[in-house]
Amino acid sequence: QILFISLFFAIPILLCSPLACGSSSQDLDVRISFDLCRGEREFLDMRKKIVSHALKKTLGLPEEPKKDEIPVVAVVGSGGGMRAMTAFYGNLSGLQQLDLLDILMYMCGVSGSTWCLSKIYKDPHWSHNDLQDAISVARKLVTSSKVGAFSAERLVYYFQQLVLLEKEGRKVTLTDLWGLIIEYFLQQKQDPSKLSDQQSAVRWGQNPFPIYAAVNVKPNISSHEFTEWCEFTPYEFGTHKYGAFIRIEDFGSEFFSGLLLGKRLEPRICFLQGIWASAFAANLDEIWEEVISSKVGFLESLKDAIKTLDPLQLERRMVMPGGAFSHLFQDIFKSRFSAGENINFMRGLYLHRDYVDAKEFVAWKGTHQDAFPNQLTPMEHSLYLIDGVFSINSPFPLVLQPERDVDVILSFNYSWEAPFEVLHQAQKYCEEREIPFPHIVVSETDKQKPKECYMFVDDHNPKVPIVLHFPLVNNTFQKYKAPGVERETEDEKSFGNFPVEGEKSPYHSMNFTYQPNEFDRLLELSRYNIMNNKEAILKALALGMKRRVLKNAKRN
């Protein structure tokens, strides 16, 4: 009944749709389509040649598989701050040592995993260069002091950058401040790069295609009740739910009815990193307590920063140090709501025509926001973009889009004390939207003591992707320093004997600085867990190739 009433009131809106009235989507600055963008389609054509050659070598095939026989393999990395970033480096290093990076089509990350992705994709040929060089740079940053992020000089820089954003017409939030802090954590200097710069890393299909995840929420509704997955790629920002995308160069610009009204500069990537990992933005007080040994020292540096600021430049803004970051920029930040508030590029477009039949919408659930057409996102003034971990701590929804047609998913999980939670969340998400996904069954023994790798597959339905799941666990690594090579000396045994979670673990999500030995252990563990499960990966690839052939046969 609620759905019927909602649809009744939506009739005038549907009739007024610019697309329904004969306007062509080609005349718009917003791309209205569920298809992949041109840049991604061209990438796939080139990448499949590379993957075909790699599969022949990896699986020992007599000849390179044809284009329609190539399984689409995607990596999804979960969130987890520096723990996720460090472990992701280790997992990728393991794949490189097994010569498997060229079989990957997509690399998708959420939260801390995006920190690793955004750094490695600065190198246009990263997957063909020795990752150890990039790892050495990351090690130096992760093990360095973060106190400089709160120095007087840096605080002045934050003020100046945020004031510039506001002068450009952007609504500044805590997420933007957090993005500037991330910039220091990951670069320790100003980073001028933009996401569009990464087009050079995929232009010839030389690396997997990167996808950065975020979710759109509503300020007055819990993220447990309503989220919409959005994606950032080197070419576009948008959402498959509504089939609406804009060029990544236009992110943050003003749109109405599909037309670009006010062009703004593409934001630097640090501000996107603030969105992708915004789960931390609401905890800035806890962060500075974690990295600053003395509150007094911090407040003194804050006072010094205030003295050096130009009062005219700040336009009489006041700093209130008494509440640390919760009151740091009281006039700029009206609340502690940590979403990145952006102009809604879909505003004025009525994209929910016949949406009841679209699987992405949960309109059948009468209490869900999707059941009320007049409250759907294209009707909103702003998008509220936050960390995808508030929905699922792994970006499964983005690689499960039917247009991407993924056959095998390598799931790298860095969740704290929750080795299978992302799988159960993804399964529920898919069930509600009738998206093919394997049924997840985990024994009580595995829940108590997880293994390094699990394969989930539907033997009867080739449309269901194969999921190879790697929990972050220290299992056989304690005994073996390499697959089949036992630890012998006391130093070797000591190196492998450490907790990755729990009270004694140094890898909790709010720790942004590791000791060198802590970084090395986590990196080597993550590398080992991949290399020790080479056969499982090869099995999944071979099975994925067979299912790709079956899938295509059924289509034909």
Image (tube, grey):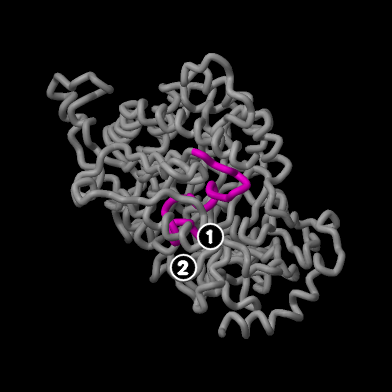
Provide residue 165's location: percent of width, then percent of height: 64, 59
Observer-nearest residue: 334 or 536?
A: 536
- In which quadrant of the rendered view does residue 551 lie? top right
Q: Compared with residue 375, is residue 284 higher up or lower down, i.e. above or below? A: above
Could you tell me the amino acid type at mark 1? Answer: Val
Query: Which of pointers 1 and 2 lies earlier in the amino acid sequence?
Result: 1
**The N terminus lies in which quarter of the figure?**
bottom right
Q: Please report the residue visible at 36 percent of the width from the left and 39 percent of the height from the top.
A: 455
User: Which mark is drawn over residue 365?
Assistant: none
Observer-nearest residue: 410 or 111?
A: 410
**The C terminus lies in which quarter of the figure?**
top right
Q: Compared with residue 73, is residue 362 higher up or lower down, i.e. above or below? A: below
Q: Secondary structure at mark 2?
A: loop
Residue corresponding to mark 1:
215
Could you tell me the amino acid type at mark 2? Answer: Ser
Observer-nearest residue: 541 or 29?
A: 541
Provide residue 489's location: percent of width, then percent of height: 14, 20
Provide residue 367's location: percent of width, then percent of height: 50, 78
Q: Residues within 10 Å of mark 1 (few under 14, many from 20)?
A: many
Q: Are marks 1 and 2 in contact (CB under 8 Å)?
A: yes
User: Does 210 appear in magenta?
Assistant: no
- In which quadrant of the rendered view does residue 53 lie? top right
Q: Which residues are magenta?
A: 386-407
Q: Please report the residue visible at 41 percent of the width from the left and 22 percent of the height from the top.
A: 97
Observer-nearest residue: 48 or 94?
A: 48
User: Does 402 appear in magenta?
Assistant: yes
Overall secondary structure of the magenta section = loop
**In this rendering, would 480 be left or right of 243?**
left
Q: CA distance from mark 1 to mark 2?
A: 9 Å
**In this rendering, would 308 be left or right of 451?**
right
User: Which mark is drawn over residue 223?
Assistant: 2
